[in-house]
Amino acid sequence: MLLEFSSTILCLILAGKVGSNIASEIGTMRITEQIDAMEIMGVNSANYLILPKITAFMLMMPVLVIFSVGAALIGGYCMAAWGGILTVDEYVYGITYAFMTYHVPYAISKSVIYAFVITSVSAYYGYTAKGGALEVGKASTNAVVKSIVVILFLDIFLTKLMLS
């Protein structure tokens, strides 16, 4: 749970939901010329539209990872208590046997990096969308696919870097 599932798999799932939402929202604003209107008024549109999304997602992603780990541990405890497959003492011994405290900040730091990747890639594809509604859909799809690919490559790189 700590090493891969709560950080990597959760971010892959959220890349589909949040990334698509960000890309389509900003892409629609670009297509309907709302971003152009902001720039004419002298507003830094990228700073106004993208930075709050990046900041919010980078702040909330560790909370979601901690919640995910906590829910998994509680679920495992309940299954041990009521499932009859193993005892609660065996479950507690199993999760504490190979526990390393470094895995907690490792998972949280990975999730923050992944949150930055998801929001920045999605915002880029939405911000550079051109054309009509069809291109907004393509930008949203491209944002999700590219975010997932970058997260998978970063997972390999960060695991080598942080766990060796």
Image (spheres, grey):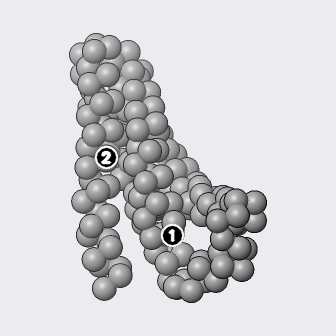
Q: Earlier in the sequence, mark 2 or mark 1?
A: 1
What residue is shown with label 1? 2
Relative horizontal placement of residue 10, taking residue 162 as reference (left or right): right
What residue is shown with label 2? 147
Quarter of the image where the C terminus is located: bottom left
Contact between labelled residues 1 and 2, with CB atoms less than 8 Å apart: no
Q: Quadrant of residue 152?
A: bottom left
Task: Inspect this view and state whether residue 84 appears.
Answer: yes
Residue at 46 percent of width and 75 percent of height: 106
**Depth check: 161 or 45 in front?**
161
Query: Residue 38 location in percent, x, y?
Result: 43, 27
Query: Residue 67 location in percent, x, y?
Result: 64, 58
Element marked by disc 1 = loop
Residue ranking furthest to the front = 84
Q: Is residue 97 above or below residue 74?
A: below
Type of the residue with mark 1: Leu
Element marked by disc 2 = helix
Type of the residue with mark 2: Ser
Pointer 2 local density, CA inside 10 Å: few below 14, some 14–19, many at least 20: many
